[in-house]
Amino acid sequence: MSGTAGVACKFHPDATLIEDYRAGDQICSECGLVVGDRVIDVGSEWRTFSSESGGEDKSRVGGAENTLLGSSDLSTIIGPGRGGASFSSDGNAMYNNRRTVSSSDRTLINAFRTISNMADRINLPKTIIDRANNLFKMVSDGKNLKGRANDAIAAACLYIACRQEGVPRTFKEIVAVSTISKKEIGRCFKLILKAHDTSVELITTGDFMSRFCGTLSLSRDVQKAATSIAKKAVDLDIVPGRSPISVAAAAIYMASQASDDKRTQREIADIAGVADVTIRQSYKLMLPRAAELFPQDFKFTTPIENLPQN
């Protein structure tokens, strides 16, 4: 029961109005006069659980519309028949669902599902999934990557989306959640950038530092030192030709060995997705100039001269 502002019975202005949600009417409680119709039910939607609904779908709405698809996601679903008129004389259903989804939309739906599954496995937010979906749609419409596996294109789109959103992931992290080789994803990545004039920011050591240190449970001071070591090593051109990931891993190793929170090359290699020998090579290049790389206020537990030599 409620009295709605602006609507009242002309014979009983002060009477409470009764809202009949089934009929969509507002009724005067004194004389029964219908004073308003087409009332919108703002109550909650039916809760549906497929295992308990007994074949009856109480939901009155469909899924959210996907603007990247055509009109194929706005389809009519015929419910299960309940009367004799719903079945033919031999017991077969008279009416069946016929879903006519175009091959291009089917490709997009499968790719979007693949992207979503990969992103869920490495805890990526929806903003990155949406960007990757848009990128795949652009590639699909451009038809410049014909002959390439859709899963490989989807993985490359996710990799590009991560870099464009400022949270880059390594190729090995993407490969770990996909069924495609690193080489094939790399090929698709280069083809997408070339064919669609898509730009990505160059990755730096700082892009990975906080994530790697957080996964290794290193202290804030060690992370700060590792960030300084990696940045100065790049600025001073001590590690020419080395990938930012291997430089970041070597910087973390150096900073942790100088502190009381030490990590082995194997532990860091497992997190960074690089080989032990790769970390070792970058570390050997940085060690002779370690005194220049550490921040001035770093508190050494192990002096520079006592750091591991390899």
Image (cartoon, rainbow, N blue to C red):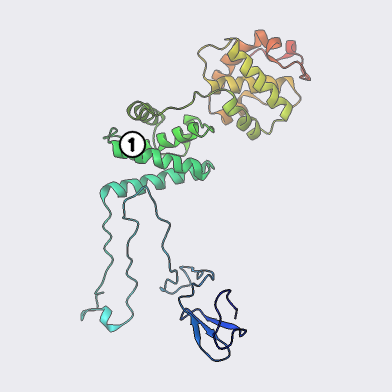
Q: Position of residue 204 (x, y in %)?
A: 55, 23
- Counting other residues with Cα less than 10 Å from the Cα at mark 1, is it few (<14), some (14-19), or many (20 or more)? many
Q: Is residue 131 left or right of residue 270?
A: left
- At a point 61% along the width and 14% down the height, the residue shown is 233
Name which residue type carries label 1.
Val
Residue lying farthest front? 10
- At a point 47% along the width and 69% down the height, the residue shown is 51
301 in relation to 138, above or below: above
159 in relation to 64, above or below: above
Number of marks in picture:
1
* Residue 73 appears anywhere in the view: yes
Q: Is residue 204 left or right of residue 51?
A: right
Quarter residue 43 falls in: bottom right
**Front residue of this view, candidates 254 and 293:** 293
SS label for mark 1: helix
Which residue is tagged 1?
139
Q: Position of residue 93 (x, y in %)?
A: 26, 74
